[in-house]
């Protein structure tokens, strides 16, 4: 094991500690960054480095805007710009190895990964018996009233008569669009309306899977997006009460200018790339930072270099990642079953890791 007192490791620990000092977990002593060689990363030599390089270049515009960022990551983006693109596999692999140093994030609980996707549901621009739950636009007083209305208050009419309704869905479908933070809504005339995140009420996110386990409706072994959804559909009389256990509420905007061929826009303001964009805890890591992920998907091992380009209310901790798996039902099936431990390895620019 590398010497934990190395200068690079000490700087890495200080970076994590600084993020905690700015409002994160108080248990900073339980987190360390361990310098590891590229050769030790499982599957590194078999990685599609050209695709990873393209994803890094894609994320560099986020790096340039992130206020947390020191000059070193910007230097890596400048080096990528000089290399140009698209880069060949060998040149891309050499780029990462020359400009970055892998650091495994070690926490008491270890790394943990889930998956998310952009769902597609049926809906309508008008309320009906089938589609009776709206997705709401951002209210103009969001951020001025604290605490803001919670999910139950909003669903009972706290924001009524403000004309914030964007589109109407089945209540369970609307809830899952809230969970994913974006979605595609197929209208009765065949058009597809795309909606994206535009704010939240600021109240804590509560995973209702945990609520259903506590109630004995599901078990820790059986809980998944699919089983949660099935229970809500099968128990409409109790579904509203259970969903309201999650007091967090998301507001949306219509993304008319975004091509359907692109992924949804993440927290970095960029279209997400399937299996390359990673949601992280932004209190710890800047957008645009490369992260090597070693975990398992329902379909098998997942060992890839990803880019931090999104965040989420449920993504908490320096070794917590949420893998964007794409759009539609197939991606949703895999995302709903994804919950696995693994290694979270940040690629620190060498200037910062010295």
Image: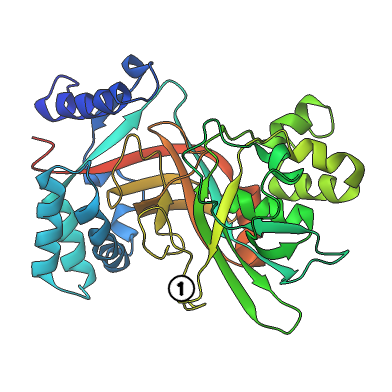
Q: What SS does tag 1 mark? A: loop
Q: Work out which residue is located at the far bottom of the displayed protein and give it.
A: 189
Question: Callout 1: few (<14), some (14-19), or many (20+) C-alpha neighbours within 10 Å?
Answer: some
Q: On the picture, is 200 further left or further right than 184?
A: left
Position of the C terminus by quadrant: top left
Q: Position of residue 339 (x, y in %)?
A: 58, 41
The reply to whether residue 1 is visible in this rendering is no
The reply to whether residue 49 is visible in this rendering is yes
Q: Work out which residue is located at the far front of the displayed protein and give it.
A: 161
Q: Is residue 167 above or below residue 292?
A: below
Position of the N terminus by quadrant: top left
Residue depicted at 22% across the width and 44% down the height: 67
Quadrant of res 18: top left
Q: Position of residue 76 (x, y in %)?
A: 13, 54
Of 307 and 98, the residue lying toward us: 307
Q: Position of residue 301 (x, y in %)?
A: 50, 51
Of 23 and 50, the residue lying toward us: 23
Residue topped by disc 1: 262
Quadrant of res 136: bottom right
Q: Position of residue 10 (x, y in %)?
A: 16, 23
Residue depicted at 61% across the width and 48% down the height: 179
Residue depicted at 36% across the width and 40% down the height: 282
């Amino acid at each position: 094991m590398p010497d934990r007192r190395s200068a690079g490791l000490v700087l890495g620990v200080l970076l994590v500690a600084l993020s905690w000092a700015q409002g994160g977990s108080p248990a900073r002593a339980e987190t360390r960054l361990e310098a590891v060689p590229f050769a030790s990363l499982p599957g590194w030599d078999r990685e599609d480095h050209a695709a990873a390089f393209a994803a890094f270049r894609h994320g560099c515009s986020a790096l340039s805007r992130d206020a947390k960022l020191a000059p070193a990551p910007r230097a890596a983006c400048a080096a990528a710009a000089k290399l140009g693109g698209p880069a060949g596999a060998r040149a891309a692999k050499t780029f990462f190895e020359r400009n970055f140093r892998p650091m495994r994030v070690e926490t008491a609980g270890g790394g943990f990964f889930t998956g998310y996707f952009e769902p597609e549901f049926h809906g309508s621009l008008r309320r009906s018996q089938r589609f009776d739950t709206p997705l709401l636009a951002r209210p103009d007083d969001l951020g001025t009233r604290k605490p803001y209305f919670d999910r139950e208050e909003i669903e009972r009419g706290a924001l009524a008569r403000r004309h914030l309704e964007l589109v109407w869905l089945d209540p369970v479908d609307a809830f899952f669009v809230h969970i994913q933070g974006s979605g595609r809504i197929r209208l009765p005339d065949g058009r597809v309306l795309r909606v994206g995140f535009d704010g939240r009420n600021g109240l804590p996110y509560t995973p209702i899977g945990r609520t259903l386990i506590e109630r004995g409706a599901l078990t820790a072994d059986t809980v998944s997006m699919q089983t949660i959804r099935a229970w809500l559909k099968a128990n409409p009389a109790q579904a509203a009460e259970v969903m309201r256990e999650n007091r967090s509420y998301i507001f949306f905007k219509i993304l008319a200018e975004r091509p359907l061929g692109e992924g949804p826009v993440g927290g970095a303001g960029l279209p997400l790339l399937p299996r390359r964009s990673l949601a992280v805890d932004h209190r710890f890591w800047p957008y645009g930072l490369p992260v090597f992920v070693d975990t398992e998907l329902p379909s098998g091992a997942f060992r890839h270099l990803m880019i931090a380009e999104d965040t989420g209310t449920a993504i908490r901790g320096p070794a917590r990642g949420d893998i964007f798996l794409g759009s539609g039902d197939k991606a949703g099936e895999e995302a709903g079953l994804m919950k696995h431990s693994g290694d979270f390895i940040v690629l620190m620019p060498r200037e910062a890791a010295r």
